[in-house]
Image (cartoon, rainbow, N blue to C red):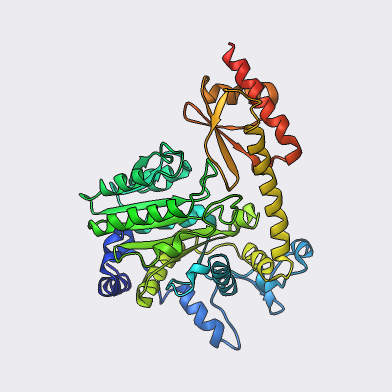
Amino acid sequence: MNPLAQQLNETLQKESPDVYAMLSNLGKAIYFPKEGILSQSAEAKTKASKFNATIGIATEGGKPMHLKLIQDTLSAYNPKDIYEYAPPAGKPELRSAWRAKMFKDNPSLEGVSFGNPIVTNALTHGLSIVADLFADEGDAVVIPNKNWENYELTFGVRRGAEIVEYPLYNESMQFNSAGLREALLAQQGKGKAIVLLNFPNNPTGYTPGVRECDEIIAAIREAAEAGIHVVAVTDDAYFGLFFEDSVQESMFSKLAALHPRVLAVKVDGATKEEYVWGFRVGFITYASESQATLAALEQKTLGIIRSTISSGPHPSQTFVLHALQSPDFEAQKAEKFDIMKGRANRVKSLLDSGRYGDTWEYYPFNSGYFMCLKLTKVSAEDVRQHLLNDYGIGTIALGETDLRVAFSCIEEEYLEELFDTIHKAVTEVSAR
């Protein structure tokens, strides 16, 4: 094993042995090279006052070389903030700005010890880092049965982990904390579990309330007390889009110092929060009382980044930083929130109007981009195909009964037509 990896492992074994026990074989072997090209280039950037012949970019006139036809469309930005490589951990100013935003959005983080957010190539990349660092073949990844299908690829296919599902809703159609508890405690023999908490949920648009969150925390604490090492990951892709009564903060703060055998990891990003999907700017953040542990986890994370994408795109990091620093940011974001909330409320009023009879049920939703219909008499795939082929309407079929509708991308004035047409399609499929 490389001496740098061994040094990081020894730090974790001393500072947080439970965190060390959570690492995958790759997580134990990975490190960020301190004497490679990047570190020597960083040193030269501060000391090479005459010529800096280190990093592989081209310069001209003391600035990064660039094509005028590209710069003309980006003239508001300095070439050094667009064309140079971003550091593997991300643009330092962006990391600081996102950390400040985390405190603003999550007041309960005050006094919590957590690391500086590390920039990822959006949330999928952040989750992939979690998988690489902590998931070995056969390790349990605990998720609800209503989940984002990419979890299977990221943890199951890529890393060989075992996907353990529990029903998202209980009989009262609230979050099934008892199911989570049971799924966690079933991993006692393995001694380890990765838990993914995705709120607002994709595909249902559900976020639990305060009492439900307390039950989730209690279930994870009980698993830790039973000797299970829990990597507790908050997938906060749709964070902030809370339209009704639910928790308004990430569960990260409550998980941060829950138990020595619980490692809290926050995966979030500007992708959906700031409506910049194609920018691919996300973050991964770890919590620990030990600064040495946080430093070691950051170095291992940088090793994963260096060995996969090297570093994230610089222009989009600059664009997001510019937005976060703008005095107009909060007002413009609130304007878009109101639009999204209006769409969600309109969908709910349509579904509760009684106009669709017993054609379907719908799963509780109060946040995010989506909602799910539960079709009671026909196949969701048959309805999806009929809507697409005969009405030019796209939806997502999940399993036999569930049809996901993204109200996020439908103007409020068209929602009535959308659901009326879905109802008509279901009726037509039923009559076949």
**Residue 307 appears in view:** no
Q: Is residue 368 above or below residue 361?
A: below
Residue 313 shown left or right of residue 156 in the figure: right
- Residue at left offset 66%, top offset 21%: 424
State which quarter of the image contains the C terminus: top right
**Residue 13 vertical position relative to residue 141 in the rendered view, above or below:** below
> In x, y percent, where is residue 102?
54, 67
Q: Is residue 23 above or below residue 152?
A: below
* The furthest residue to the left: 189
Count of marks overlaid on the render: 0
Front position in the image: 426 or 389:
426
Position of residue 85 in the picture relative to residue 319 (left or right)? left
**Percent position of residue 401, x then y:** 49, 27
Residue 294 percent location from the top left of the image: 39, 72
Where residue 426 appears, x then y in whole percent? 60, 21
Q: Residue furthest top?
A: 432
Taking 185 as reference, is 358 above or below it? above
Q: Quadrant of the N terminus?
A: bottom left
Quadrant housing residue 178:
top left
Residue occupying the point 48% across, 43% down: 148
The residue under the point 59% across, 72% down is 97
Residue 46 seen by the camera: yes
Residue drawn at the location 56% of the way across and 26% of the way down = 360
Q: Quadrant of residue 75?
A: bottom right
Where residue 335 sits, quadrant-wise, is bottom right
